[in-house]
Image: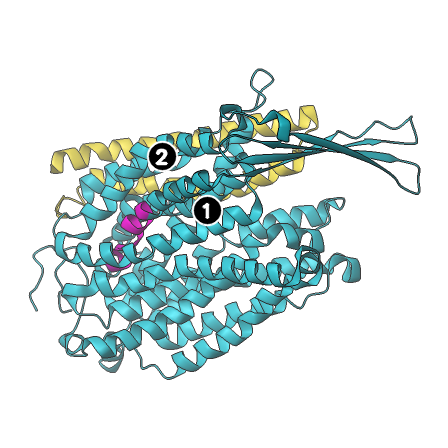
Chain colours: A cyan, B yellow
Amino acid sequence: MAKSSTPVVAGSFISESDSMGTQGLMKVIMASSVGTLIEWYDFYIYGAMATTIARQFFPQDNPTAAFLAALATFAAGFVVRPFGALVFGRIGDLIGRKYTFLLTLLLMGGSTFAIGLIPGYAKIGIWAPILILMLRFVQGLALGGEYGGAATYVAEHAPANRRGYFTSYIQTTATLGFFLSLGVILTTRQTLGVEAFNDWGWRIPFIVSIFLIAISVYIRLRMAESPLFAKIKKEGKTSSNPLKESFAQKSNLRMVLLALFAAVMGQGVVWYTGQFYAQTFIERTLSVEFEQVRYLLCIAILLGTPFFLVFGAWSDKIGRKTIMLGGMLLAILTYRPIYKAMYSLGDPKTKVEIAERASTSAAVAVNAAGDSTRTTTTVKAFTDGSSMKTVKKETVLADKSKPAPKAETTKTFWLSSNGFWMMVFFVFIQIIYVTMVYGPIAAFLVELFPTRIRYTSMSLPYHIGNGIFGGLTPFIATRLFDASKTTENPAGDPYVGLWYPILIAGVCFIIGLLYLPSKKQEAVVE
Amino acid sequence: MNALKRLSGFLWIALGAIAIYLMAKQAGIEIANAIKNNKAVLDTKMFWYIIIPIFTPIMLGLCLFGWYAWKGEYDRVEG
């Protein structure tokens, strides 16, 4: 192997990895990927069922519970991840990759299984949301430790000239984990029916996790330690203090900062915009029906996933920088036109109504206190095949001295067949951007740091970029949208939320263009 | 190229500092408005109580990145 002429390149890849053979390497990849996929599945099912969980554990009339609900979804899931990266990264560089990502897998699986067993707020009161919050914290920590381990493990087995391709299998797991979580939830919901699912059936996807984890633990127990780590451990070259070496030494800290601001920050926002903000936008801004949203996401993700491998492999030939920055640039330039096109697909104002198919029905219900609720349901059909149902609930209190509650209006929009496939296409384009920025990122990160501190050094920027910059994208974008609602424009600007990913990706693109090495990384021997 | 890398270091330092200032200012405005209008006070506070402690160190990291760039620490990284 040749020595790199670029002094900052710290990757260390020994030749025996190259002789492992593709078949052996595929076993390593599969064993690593299955566990990582299951961890992503565990992480996503909470997010996908946040509304159902909120009903069971976080009653909105209890302010403390409502606060804990927001904290559990908002902070614990994403903000805790960098801390997990530090804790488990350190362990991984001290004792080894194999046992560390076995530990994260057990923690993730155990906490997910436990969430499925916790009695609701109605039974144990405030302990229910507190326990959920604690378990969500554990999930965030475990996820923070998992990815770096899996990516490092695979990269340290892969030959230098195909590192992008082989590590891109690990990159597919986040998307496939999301796909798996949607699939299990949809199947359970359809099998049990909506009522039973909301009542108790939501626990099944959590409980199922324990079986998936058991299989994955069995597979991982049979894996050997990474050859590079085993070698430096045998030679007594492991770091005695990976945290200090990673973040207190300028030579490594500057590379951690470079990884974050020149690559992962932009990659994180592009990933979370394409895969998650798109869902928020379609579901909340356009009010498209629950199952239709999930089906279209599943199709787009399934079609897009092979491109992780395509761009991972391509990055071995033309370099990581071109592909990652290319994905960011495309996202910056096209997000607004894409979201405008998506909006028009679900905007009833742009459609022609079939007047004879319109219907309105009303029902009045009176409770024991004498309060009456009038529910008015209006259904409209449009010439393109789409339809919309509006349900308006107005409550009149028996006690006239109390202020009347605000009327609640919920809209559900069904896309036409053509509109559905067009929406799949627009999400698919965004998934392609995701595959461009995310496919080569594992190879890019492992190449920046030496073996002795690789797990710690690459995990932190990865989880700051993805957990914080990326993970908070749907919340920040939705908040920008809500803030744009004024008395002059009560509907708000539906595209204002896109400025967050565009701005972050824009800054990252410029930094990356200026500071990232443009040539392919060469392997060096420590 | 190296001169551009070094000069733009100032830009990253400035960007980090401005971002911290704007975050603090926006948080003050939004929390004050929420309290004044008694609307979504908890949500607003919680949003900013999470955003500021999380993003401030990251923005300080951007300033440090700018400092390193200005000092020529990234000159040997081929751009």
Q: Quadrant of residue A224?
A: bottom left
Left or right: residue A173 compared with residue A411: left
Amino acid type indicated by mark 2: Tyr
| Residue numbers of the magenta segment | A432-445
Numbered disc 2: what chain? A
What residue sits right under mark 1 in the picture?
A276
In front of the other: A337 or A4: A337
Left or right: residue A142 compared with residue A446: right
- Asked if A451 appears above or below A462 in the picture, the reply is below
Q: Considering only order in the chain, which callout, 2 or 1, is on the residue closer to the N terminus?
A: 1
Query: Measuring 56% from the left and 71% from the top, which residue is drawn there?
Result: A208
Numbered disc 1: what chain? A
Q: Are marks 1 and 2 on the same chain?
A: yes
**Helix, strand or loop for disc 1:** helix
Q: Confirm whether residue B68 shows in the render.
A: no
Q: How many marks?
A: 2
What residue sits right under mark 2 in the picture?
A335
Residue A50 drawn at (x, y percent)? 60, 52
Indicate yes or no whether the magenta region holds residue A440.
yes
In front of the other: A182 or A8: A182
**Helix, strand or loop for disc 2:** helix
Q: Main secondary structure of the magenta part?
A: helix
Left or right: residue A332 compared with residue A392: left
